[in-house]
Amino acid sequence: MSTPDGALFSDPFHNEFGTWMLGYSPAGGGDVGEVAAVGRAVGDGDDGAFFDAWVAAGDRVRAEADAAAAAGRPGASDLYLRASAFYASSYHPLFGTPVDPRLLDGFRRQIDAFDAGLALRGIHPAAVPVGDARVPAYLVPAFGRETEVRPLLILVNGYDATVTDSYFASAVAALRRGYHCLLFDGPGQGAVLFEQGVPMRPDWEVVVSAIIDHALTSPIVDPDRIAVSGWSLGGYLAPRAASGDARIAACIADPGQQDLGAGLSTFARRLGATEEEAADPSGLDDAVVDRLMGVIEQDRKLRWSIVQRGFWVNGVSDLKSFLARSAEYRIDRVADIRCPVLLTRAEGDPLAAGVPAFAAALPDATVIDFTAAEGAGGHCSMQNRSLLNRRALDWLDDVLAAR
């Protein structure tokens, strides 16, 4: 096996998915040696080898968790959650329809370990009704302040992350800071997509309003200090929620996105569409769509992002429908977002291109930049997630203190 310089997996496609775990290390996810060991186990193998290696690593940690739980050791909960992160890393290359049974197997192992870890802390998922979906929601109390009335941070995932990812990427840092956290997978995400077949929806205010209604049934939630934070596509979903629910006191969008349709125009030009064709990607004629689809099919990462993931998450089966559906993801009522909003902008993240215009349209916006020099210039600053969490939570502390 040969790997590119600095890579832990020989296949660049696998390396991007496999090294995502490193952003979870400070929160108790896999360490670099474990990720490197998985990379060696995959070798020059295919997506099946990638899946098998991660599941084997998850099984190893799960066995340690079972032994710790049987012995009554205090670290059992953390080990179950750690195993969940390994399983969650296994199946991303397998995204798409018809649904690969290995994806469901990896996901079910993930959630079983996740639930086991939280159950040891007395935390169990609720099923919150949102339209046709039953949304799994976990209210996780702040570490060491489990019975206190505290501010609540609602965490919103994007296209392909799940509750396990939001736990390690964002929740642990917030729980240490004294925030209660509510984790959930909504339509188009996690169990709601994988098990229930419910696709994504642009009106995320409906989803988060139902989540807030559920959260307010708990006596430990301060109703005046409820914040929402979204990463990746959640950088659109979170502020969209804030535009429709005045109970949200603060919003973090990582990175901030107001209009996915504007990004589609840039995307279409990059694939070879003319300026006129790119002006309205949802209205492209079939010949142009076929030409763009040909480009997508030749690029493995693009094919995964658009065909395997994008089609499935949005409940569509062709590029034209995907473009039309994506154009619905826009925030028209920006002025209705009355709460303070933090927009992150990592210099190497193409999703952050619209941050300046979004900030200018918001009544109360703060922009925090993240750079490659800080090791935080990539998508969602995953190579230095600790820095992003620290700055975002500092901002949130100040905003909620002012209330």
Image (tube, rainbow, N blue to C red):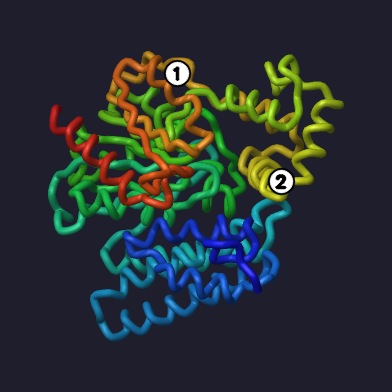
**Which secondary structure, mark 2?**
helix
Horizontal arrangement in the rendering, residue 295 relative to residue 16 (left or right): right
Q: Residue at x 37, y 77 (%)?
A: 65
Q: Residue at x 69, y 70 (%)?
A: 45
Identify residue type, mark 2.
Arg
Q: Quadrant of the N terminus?
A: bottom right
Q: Is residue 126 visible?
A: no
Q: Quadrant of the C terminus?
A: top left
Q: Is residue 113 above or below residue 136?
A: below
Disc 1: which residue: 357
Nearer to the camera, 204 or 1: 1
Report x, y in % for residue 233. Answer: 50, 37
Identify residue type, mark 1.
Ala
- Looking at this view, name the residue that lies furthest to the right: 287
Bin the neighbour count of mark 2 within 10 Å (Cα to Cα): few under 14, some 14-19, many 20 and up. some
Nearer to the camera, 70 or 386: 386
Nearer to the camera, 378 or 282: 378
Q: Residue at x 14, y 54 (%)?
A: 145
Disc 2: which residue: 303
